[in-house]
Image (cartoon, helix red, strand yellow):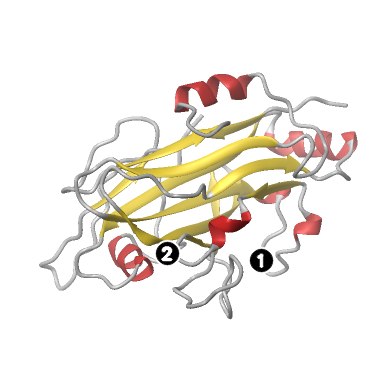
Amino acid sequence: MTKNKIIAIVTVVALIAVAVIGGTLAYFTDTDKATNAFTAGNVDITLHEANTEGAQDEEYQTWLEDQVLYPGSKTTNNLAKIVTVENTGKSEAYVRVHIAIPQILDNGDPEFDAGKNVLHFNADADSYTDGLWNWGKKVTIGRNNFVGSGDNWNFYEATIDGIAYNVYVVTYETILDAEATTAKAAMTQVYLDSKVTNADVESINEVLGENWKILVVAEGCQTAGFDNAFDALNTSFGTPGSYTVEWPTA
C-alpha cells in the first residue's frame, strides 16, 4: 500500500477585513492563520488544530509529520484533526471557519454524495446542536442536523495554488466570549474511504503530489450591532465565495 501523509495546514491569517457601509462605518474583524497575526480593533481570534483535546498547535504539527493515512473508516485508520477557535481578544466575537478540501478527494455540488468521497471528514455529532456549529447558509431554529431544515450547505469552490478545492463554511452561531474557545470542534478527524485503491492514490498523487492538504481559515468579527452570526460575518467579510480568502501556503 502506498503511504501518503496528509498535511493539515493551520491558518491564522490576521488580515484586517473591513466592510464599509455608506462609506462611513467599518466593522472590527480578524482572521487567523499561523503567521503574522494582528488584530483589527478589539477583535482577536486564534485558530487551533490538535490531535488530542488540549494539545498545543506545535505538538499537532510535529505529530502530523509522522502520520500515514490508510483506507479505513471513522473508527479505524482515521487521522485526528481537532479544529477549534479561541477568542483571544477582549470583546465578544462571532466566528466561522472555511474548510477547503481538494475536489479530487471530495464529491461536492450538486451531488454532495459522501459515498463518492475519497477523503471523509467528521465532527462530533453534538457539535451540530443549536447554537454551536452550523454548516448551512443561514440561522435556523430547532434544527435537528448540521445542515438545518431547508438549508443548503454553505459551500463554494476555489482554486488555490493551481488546485481546485471544495470549500465548506461552518458558522458558530453562539457569541464567543472574550478568552473563550468554541465549546466543540468544527472538525475532529479525516479518513480515507475503505474502497480507495493503490491505483486511486497514484492517480491522485499525479494531481496533488504525495502530501494532500486540507486548508483551514478562521474569521471573527464584532457582535455589536448584529442579531446573529450570519448577518455579522456576511456583512463584515462578505458572503462566502464572493471574496478572496487568503489561504495558508506550504
Q: Which mark is residue 14?
A: none
Structural crowding at the residue carrying mark 2, measured as other residues with C-alpha within 10 Å and reported as few (<14), some (14–19) or many (≥20)? few
Circle 2 sits in a helix, a strand or a loop, which is it? Answer: loop
**Mark positioned earlier in the residue sequence (2 or 1):** 1
Could you tell me which quadrant the N terminus lies in? Answer: top right
Q: What residue is at 28 percent from the left and 42 percent from the top?
A: 179
The residue where tag 2 is placed is 242
Which residue is more in the foreground, 250 or 135? 135
The quarter of the displayed image where residue 194 is located:
top right
Structural crowding at the residue carrying mark 1, measured as other residues with C-alpha within 10 Å and reported as few (<14), some (14–19) or many (≥20)? few
Q: Which mark is residue 109?
A: 1
Residue 116's spot in the image, x, y percent? 80, 56
Task: State the CA–CA distance, disc 2 to disc 1.
Answer: 17 Å
* Image-based side of 188 in relation to 119, left or right: left
Residue 193's spot in the image, x, y percent? 81, 45
Residue 234's spot in the image, x, y percent? 35, 66
Q: Compared to 165, does 130 lie above or below?
A: below
Q: What residue is at 61 percent from the left and 50 percent from the top?
A: 123
Residue 63's spot in the image, x, y percent? 59, 21
Give the residue type that dot 1 points to: Asp
Q: Compared to 140, does 85 lie above or below?
A: above
Circle 1 sits in a helix, a strand or a loop, which is it? Answer: loop
Give the residue type that dot 2 points to: Ser
* Image-based side of 67 in relation to 132, left or right: right
